[in-house]
Image: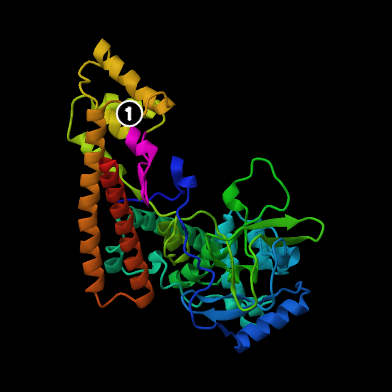
C-alpha cells in the first residue's frame, strides 16, 4: 500500500459518503486556557493593534489545544484578521526586526522555509529581548507525533510509501540544516551555533504552521517561496468539513479568514487546511482524523508487480497506458475503485496481445480505448471478471497485512500514546477501505 502526497479524487468521489461531524470534539466541555503565556501573548496582540476576535484558546477533548468561540459566529463573518505588519515572511524580516542578522537573512539565497526557520531560532536565542517573544513562547515545545521525529524502530510501523515520504522529508530537512549552517558560518560570519534538534524544532514550526501568502501577484515566482507565519491564525485546527476562505485584503492590509460555517458559543472553531488524507496530515502536521473522506489506498506497487510476472509484451501495454494518460495512480477509496485502476487492469487482462500490430490485437485495443471514451462500459464479460477477481484478491491480502501491523503496534510498549493512536487509525482505516471495496465487489456479483 502506498500514498503519494497529492489528493486523489476518483470519478464518483463527488458523491460523498456521509461524514461524521467533528465540530464537537467530545462530550466533555472545553477548558479555557488561562496560563501566563497565553495572557502575555493576548496582551501583546492588543498592544500591536491586532483586530478583536470572537476566539479564545481552550483545551478540547480529542484535539488538544484549539480556538473556541466566545460568541456565536455567523456565516460570512471574519474569524480572524492578521495585520500585514505581524505576518512574518522572508521579505518582511528586515522591517520586522532591525538587526544585521535579519537583514542578512533577507539578502541571502536561503529558501523561504530556511529563512523563516532560522529567524525563529535567532529570536528564540534573544529570549525576552525578542520583539516576538510572546509568540515564540506559544509555539509547540516539541513535535513528538510528526513521523520525522520518530525513532527508526517506530518508522517500521508506517505504511511503505509513507516511510518513503518520511525519508524524503528528512533528506530535505538535513539539506536545509546544512544550508543554514553554511550560511551562518560563511555569509553571516557569525559565532552563533545552532544544534540539529534546535533547527528541527524551528523547521517543523514553519512546516506545520505556515500559510500560503502572496499579497501582491508576482510573475515567475516559485509557489513554495510564498509562505508566511501568521500569529494567532496558526492556533486554529483543521476540519475537512469546514467551508472558509483565506485571502489578503488590500484595503485593510490584513490576511483574513472568512467562515462559511456557523459556530456556536463554546464550540471549537476550525479552518480547512485542504483536501488532505491522513498520510499527508500525519506527515506534515503530526495528526490524523477519524473517518477522513480523503483517505485512499494506492495499488501501484501491486499492479506493477503483477505486470512483472508476465515478461512478454509488458512494455507495450505500459506504453499504451502512458500514451493514454493512465500510467500509475491506481487508487481505492471507501466503497470505490478508481477508473484509472479499472482501465489499467482491463488492458492488462486483454488476451491475446502477442503481436501489437495484428488485426486481432488492434481490435482489442480499440475496445479498451472505447471504455476510456465512455462508448463502452467494459471490454468483455470475461475481462471484467478477471479485473474484479484480482482486486478482490489483493484487498484480502492487504487486509492480512493490516491485521499483522495492528498486532505489532498493539504489542509494542515503546510507542508514545499520540503516535500509537495515529498508527492504529492509519491501519484500521486502510483496513476499512479494503473491506468496503470487497463488499462492493460482492454486491456487484449479486446484482
Q: Residue furthest front?
A: 447
Q: Name the residue rendered at 31%, 47% in the picture.
A: 440
Q: Which residue is mark 1?
A: 378
Could one spot residue 358 in this view of the protein? no
Q: Position of residue 299 (x, y in %)?
A: 30, 45
Q: Is residue 114 left or right of residue 381?
A: right
Q: How is the image coloured?
A: rainbow
Residue 339 vertical position relative to residue 44 in the rendered view, above or below: above
Q: Position of residue 195 (x, y in %)?
A: 46, 72
Q: Where, quadrant-wise, is the C terminus in this rendering?
A: top left
The stretch of residues the image draws in magenta is: 327-343
Magenta stretch holds residue 317: no
Q: Is residue 38 left or right of residue 196?
A: right
Q: Name the residue rendered at 31%, 42% in the picture.
A: 300
Q: Secondary structure at mark 1?
A: loop
Q: Name the residue rendered at 25%, 72% in the picture.
A: 410
Q: Position of residue 386 (x, y in %)?
A: 22, 34
Q: Is residue 130 left or right of residue 412?
A: right
Amino acid at each position: 500500500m502506498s500514498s503519494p502526497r497529492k489528493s486523489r479524487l476518483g470519478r464518483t468521489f463527488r458523491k460523498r459518503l456521509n461524514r461524521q461531524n467533528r465540530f464537537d470534539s467530545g462530550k466533555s466541555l472545553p477548558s479555557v486556557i488561562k496560563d501566563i503565556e497565553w495572557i502575555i501573548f493576548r496582551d501583546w496582540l492588543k498592544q500591536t493593534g491586532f483586530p478583536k476576535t470572537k476566539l479564545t484558546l481552550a483545551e478540547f477533548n480529542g484535539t488538544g489545544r484549539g480556538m473556541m468561540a466566545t460568541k456565536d459566529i455567523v456565516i460570512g463573518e471574519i474569524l480572524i484578521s492578521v495585520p500585514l505588519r505581524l505576518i512574518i515572511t522572508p521579505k518582511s524580516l528586515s522591517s520586522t526586526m532591525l538587526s544585521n542578522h535579519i537583514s542578512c537573512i533577507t539578502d541571502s539565497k536561503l529558501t523561504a522555509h530556511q529563512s523563516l526557520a532560522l529567524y525563529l531560532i535567532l529570536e528564540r536565542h534573544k529570549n525576552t529581548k525578542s520583539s516576538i517573544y510572546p509568540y515564540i513562547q506559544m509555539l509547540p515545545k516539541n513535535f513528538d507525533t510528526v513521523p520525522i521525529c520518530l525513532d527508526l524502530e517506530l518508522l517500521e510501523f508506517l505504511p511503505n510509501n509513507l516511510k518513503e515520504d518520511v525519508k524524503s522529508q528528512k533528506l530535505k530537512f538535513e539539506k536545509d540544516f546544512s544550508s543554514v549552517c553554511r550560511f551562518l558560518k560563511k555569509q553571516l560570519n557569525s559565532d552563533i551555533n545552532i544544534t540539529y534538534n534546535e533547527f528541527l524544532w524551528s523547521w517543523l514550526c514553519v512546516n506545520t504552521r505556515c500559510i500560503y501568502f502572496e499579497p501582491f501577484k508576482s510573475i515567475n515566482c516559485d509557489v513554495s517561496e510564498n509562505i508566511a507565519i501568521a500569529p494567532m491564525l496558526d492556533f486554529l485546527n483543521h476540519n475537512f468539513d469546514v467551508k472558509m476562505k483565506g485571502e489578503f485584503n488590500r484595503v485593510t492590509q490584513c490576511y483574513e479568514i472568512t467562515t462559511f460555517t456557523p459556530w456556536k458559543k463554546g464550540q471549537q472553531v476550525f479552518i480547512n487546511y485542504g483536501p488532505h488524507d491522513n498520510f499527508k496530515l500525519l506527515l506534515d502536521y503530526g495528526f490524523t482524523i477519524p473517518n477522513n473522506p480523503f483517505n485512499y489506498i494506492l495499488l501501484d506497487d501491486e499492479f506493477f508487480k503483477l505486470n512483472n510476472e508476465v515478461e512478454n509484451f509488458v512494455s507495450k501495454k505500459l506504453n499504451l497506458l502512458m500514451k493514454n494518460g493512465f500510467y500509475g495512480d491506481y487508487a481505492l477509496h471507501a466503497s470505490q475503485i478508481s477508473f484509472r485502476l479499472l482501465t489499467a487492469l482491463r488492458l492488462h487482462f486483454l488476451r491475446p496481445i502477442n503481436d501489437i500490430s495484428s488485426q486481432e490485437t488492434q481490435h482489442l485495443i480499440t475496445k479498451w480505448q472505447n471504455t476510456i471514451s465512455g462508448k463502452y462500459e467494459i471490454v468483455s464479460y470475461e475481462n471484467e471478471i478477471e479485473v474484479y477477481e484480482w482486486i478482490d484478491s489483493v484487498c484480502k491480502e492487504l487486509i492480512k497485512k493490516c491485521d499483522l501491523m495492528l498486532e505489532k503496534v498493539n504489542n509494542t510498549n515503546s510507542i508514545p500514546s499520540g503516535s500509537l493512536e495515529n498508527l492504529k487509525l492509519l491501519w484500521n482505516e486502510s483496513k476499512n477501505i479494503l473491506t468496503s471495496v470487497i463488499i462492493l465487489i460482492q454486491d456487484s456479483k449479486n446484482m
